[in-house]
Amino acid sequence: MLAKTEERKQQKAGGKKRKHPGEDGGRREERKRKGGEEGNTGQGDGGKKRLDALSVGYFRRVGERLSEGFEDSEEREMFVENVLTEVKGKATLVAMDRTGSITLQRLLPLSSPDQVGEVLAELGGESGSEFKAVCCDRCGGHVVESGVRQISRWTESSQKDPSAATEEEGEEEEEESCGTLEAQVLSLSQIVRDNCTEFIKHAHGSHVVRTLLHVLGGCLGPPRTEARPGTKERNTAPQLTDFEIPNSFWYELKNLTETLMDNINLSVTDAVASAVFQTMLTVCNRKRPKLCKQLLKRIMEYLTSRNAAPGVSPLLVFLKDQASSHLIETIIQLSPKSLLRDLYKNHLKGQLVDLALHPIANFPIQRLTAASAKYKLFLRLFDELVQGVEAILAAGHMGVIVQLAESCAESEEKQNEMVQCLLCAFHCAEPGSRHVNCLPLFMSLLTYEVYYHSETAEGNIQTEVPLTSICYHGSRLVQALAKFKERSLLLSSLRTLTPADLLTLASDPAGSHVLQALITTSSDKGRGKILKRLEGQYVQMACSRLGSRVLEAVWNSASVSQRQSIAQELVPSESQLRSDQFARHVWAKFALTHFAHRRAHWQEIQTGESKKRKLFSDILE
C-alpha cells in the first residue's frame, strides 16, 4: 500500500495517469507504448525499468530508520553496510526512483569515501558512460551530486587512527581509500566534457555540473535539498566551505573550464547554461583568482565582439536579455577595477539612465553601482545616474536608487548631492519648510502632493496625516541615508512625528528597521530627544513583536539615565509585561525586577555595562 501511495504522488507530479510498475500482462505493453509516462520523465527518459514495489517499501523503511538516529558509530556503520549491500547491483534503479533517491542522498554522507566511490562506480558503469542518463534524471542527479560532495571527506580516513600505521603506510591507505571516489569524480568530469552541451543545457544535468565545479575547486555550499526552503534569503550568496582537494582536481578544473569556454555561446542564449557559467566564475574567483581574471576577460571579449547595430555596443543587447543579464551581473561583481573602467568607458557611458529604466537591464546597473563604490569610477556613474532619478522612481526601479544611496554611504562621496536630489524628486525641496516632512515621503516613496493629498505645489501642510504606506525599498533607502555623515535632516523629520506615528514606525516590518537605525546611530543628545517623543509608548512597544526588538536595540545603545527613564515607565505595568509573549523577554533582559526591588544594585550593574561598552567602542575606533 505504501508503494502504491508513493506511485500516486508521482503520477500527480508527472501530470499523467500511470499503472503500477509491478503489474504485468497487457499492462506492461501499455507502459512501453506510453514511453515517457514515468514519474521521472524530464528530458528523454523513455520507458525505463523501475524499482519494484518491495524495494521501494524497503528503502522507505530505511529512510524512517535513518530519521531515528544511531546509538554509536559501530551500529551506524553496520546499518550503512547492510543497506549498500541491498543497493549493489541495482544502484541505477534505486537512484532514479524517488524514494530510493531520497534515501541514498541521506545514506551517502554516512558512508565512507570508498563506499561512496563504489556506488558512483556502479552508477557510471565501466567506462563512466552511464553517468549521463543518471545525471540527467530528476532523481538520479541528486544522488550523483550527493556522492560527488563526499569527496570533501577524502582525507578523513588518514585522520581516524594516525598511530595505527607509519606515515608512508598511512599515505598509501589514504590514496587507496579515496582512490575510487577520486577516480569516479574524474570519470564524471570526463563524461561532462565529452557531452558538455547536453549537460549544461539540461535542467537536472546542469546542477550536477555546478556541483562538480564546486568540488573540483575545493569549496562547497549547502546541499540543494537543505537550501531550498530558505526563500527568505534567496538574494544572499550561499556560504561556501573550503576543503583540501587531490592534486588531480587542480588540473581537471582547468580542463573543464576550457571545455565550458568552447561553449560560451550557450551562456547568452540559454538561462540554464548561463547559471553554470556563473558558478564557474564564482568558484574560480574564490579558489583560482588568476584563472578567473582570464575567464572574465575572455567572456567579455566574446560578448563585446558580437554583431550589433552600427555605433551600438552589443553589450547593450545582452544587458536587456533575461539569460545573459544574470551572467553580466556576476561578471560585474567579480571584475577588477580595470575591467569595470573599460566596461563603462567603452560600452555604458551615456547609457546608464536608459538601462536603469529597462525592466531587466536595471539589475546589472545596480551591481555596477555597488562594485564601483570602492573606486573613483563611482563619481562618474553618480553624475550620470543622478540626472534620471525622478524618471527611475517613476519607473518603479527603486533598487537602483537604494543602491546609489548605499554606494554614496560606502564611498563617503556625493552624499549632499544625493540628499538634495531626493528632496527634489519627492517635491519637498522648496519651500524649505517642507524639509521636515522628508522622512514619511522617503519611507512611503510618495511625492509631497500625493502623500499629503495637496493639489497645489506651494504652501504648508494644513492638516497632519498619520504615518502610512511604509514600504520595503523606502525603508532600505532611509537606512542607507542614515549611514551618511550628515543626518540632521532625517533626525529633524523624525522628531516631528507624533508619538502615535513613532509607535506605528516601531511596529511596522519595514519601519522598525528605520527607527532602529536612526536611534542607534544618533548621539546621546539626539537619541534623548527621540526617546522623549517615545515616552508613553514603551509598554506598547514591548508588547509588539517588532517593537520589542527596536526597544532592545535602543536599550543597548542608551545611556544609564536614558535606561532609567525607560525602566521607570515599564515597571508599573509588570503584570502585563510578564504575561506577554514578547514583553516578558524585555522584562528579563532589562533586569526590571532588580530595578523595582534593588535599585542601587541595578544602577551599579548598568553603570558598569555602560563603561565597558564605551571602553570597547573607543578601542574599535
Image (cartoon, rainbow, N blue to C red):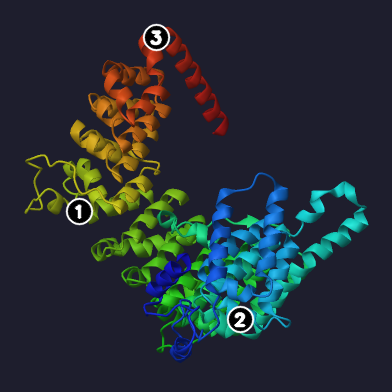
Estimate the x, y position of residue 263 in percent, counting from the top left.
58, 84
Q: Nearer the viewer, residue 241 or 328?
A: 241
Could you classify mark 2 by the number of other residues whose Cα lies within 10 Å: few (under 14), some (14-19), or many (20 or more)?
A: many
Instruction: Tell me if 378 is positioned left or right of 156 in this view.
Output: left
Q: Which amino acid does label 3 sit on?
A: Arg
Q: Earlier in the sequence, mark 1 or mark 2?
A: 2
Q: Nearer the viewer, residue 6 or 187?
A: 6
Q: What element carries label 1?
A: loop
Residue for point 31% across, 25% down:
579
* Number of the front mark, 1 or 2: 2
Q: Earlier in the sequence, mark 3 or mark 1?
A: 1
Could you classify mark 3 by the number of other residues whose Cα lies within 10 Å: few (under 14), some (14-19), or many (20 or more)?
A: some
Q: Check the image and report above or below for 62 versus 319.
A: above
Could you classify mark 1 by the number of other residues whose Cα lies within 10 Å: few (under 14), some (14-19), or many (20 or more)?
A: some
Write down the quadrant of residue 436 in the picture. Answer: top left
Cα separation, mark 3 vs mark 1, equals 47 Å
Cα separation, mark 3 vs mark 2, equals 73 Å
Q: Please give the residue where the numbered disc 3 appears in the rendered image.
A: 599
Q: Which amino acid does label 2 sit on?
A: Lys
Estimate the x, y position of residue 519 in percent, counting from the top left.
35, 34
Write down the quadrant of residue 380 in the picture. Answer: bottom left
Q: Please give the residue where the numbered disc 1 appears in the rendered image.
A: 446
Residue for point 80% across, 63% down:
177
* Number of the front mark, 3 or 1: 3
Q: Which of 224 and 611 is in front in this view?
A: 224
Q: Which of 191 and 469 is in front in this view?
A: 191
Whether residue 220 can be seen here? no
Q: Please give the residue where the numbered disc 2 appears in the rendered image.
A: 132
Estimate the x, y position of residue 601 in percent, counting from the top left.
45, 9
